[in-house]
């Protein structure tokens, strides 16, 4: 009588214990991680929510334009505007205000202006101008400057061969300069001291 029962236990024990690892792993296989669940949460406009958020009241769109110390340049495609904050350059879809992509500014540099085709950005620090290629994100030219630079406004000509800069838009005096982009040479400058003649 005991022999058949012992034989049955001998057969069932290995089967039962062999299934334990599978049972222990099954919750990990069927439940996605918390990070995976957060990564797919979107607001009503299809924009991603920040970590741990489940809902957004309002929208982040149309908040990237007309910022203090910001520069806006509509691109030739008629659909995109290039703008900036104090920390990054942003490509924004005009129709929806959606942020399409961004590029973090190099440490210590600020935006002076953008070329009309949106392929170049003139940045500055306290001593120099820096011309950056926005397609490769590489610095292609540096303009030496004898004076300390404050807030800068810059405007490129249509073919991108020259750029005019104005230093001191928020205070007097200020200098209006015309630069040759190819060799970084200062072609012309004039000091602007009146309230009415500030700006480029």
Image (cartoon, rainbow, N blue to C red):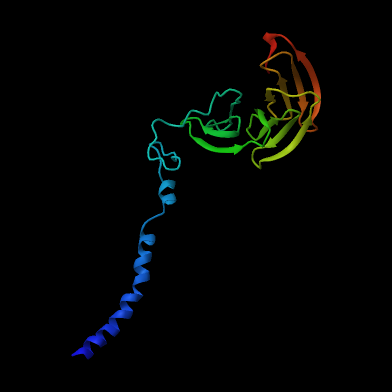
Quadrant position of the C terminus in the picture: top right
Q: Quadrant of residue 11?
A: bottom left
**What residue do we see at 33% from left, 80% from top?**
14
Q: Quadrant of residue 4?
A: bottom left
**What residue do we see at 79% from left, 19% from top?**
189
**What residue do we see at 31% from left, 78% from top?**
15
Q: Is residue 178 left or right of residue 116?
A: right
- Give the residue at the far front of this rendering: 2
Rendered position, 20 above or below 166:
below
Q: Quadrant of residue 157?
A: top right
Foreground pick, 19 / 132: 19
Residue 81, position as x, y percentages in the image: 56, 30
Residue 99, position as x, y percentages in the image: 51, 35
Q: Is residue 111 left or right of residue 43?
A: right
Quadrant position of the N terminus in the picture: bottom left
Q: Is residue 137 left or right of residue 32?
A: right
Residue 195, position as x, y percentages in the image: 68, 9
Rendered position, 91 above or below 169:
below
**What residue do we see at 28% from left, 80% from top?**
12
Residue 2, position as x, y percentages in the image: 21, 89
């Amino acid at each position: 009588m005991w022999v058949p029962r012992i034989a049955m236990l001998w057969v069932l024990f290995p089967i039962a214990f062999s299934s334990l690892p599978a049972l222990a792993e099954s919750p990990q296989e069927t439940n996605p991680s918390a990070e995976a669940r957060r990564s797919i949460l979107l607001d009503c406009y299809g924009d991603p929510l920040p970590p741990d958020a489940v809902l957004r009241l309002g929208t982040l769109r149309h908040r990237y334009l007309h910022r203090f110390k910001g520069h806006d340049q509509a691109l030739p495609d008629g659909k995109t505007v290039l703008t900036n904050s104090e920390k990054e350059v942003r490509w924004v879809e005009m129709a929806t205000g959606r942020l399409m992509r961004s590029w973090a500014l190099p440490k210590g540099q600020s935006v002076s202006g953008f070329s009309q085709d949106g392929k170049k950005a003139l940045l500055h620090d306290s001593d120099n101008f820096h011309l950056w290629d926005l397609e490769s994100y590489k610095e292609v030219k540096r303009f030496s400057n004898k004076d300390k630079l404050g807030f800068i406004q810059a405007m490129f000509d249509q073919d991108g061969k020259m750029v005019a800069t104005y230093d001191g838009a928020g205070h007097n005096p200020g200098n209006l300069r015309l630069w040759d982009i190819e060799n970084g040479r200062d072609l012309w400058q004039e000091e602007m001291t009146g309230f009415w003649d500030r700006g480029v």
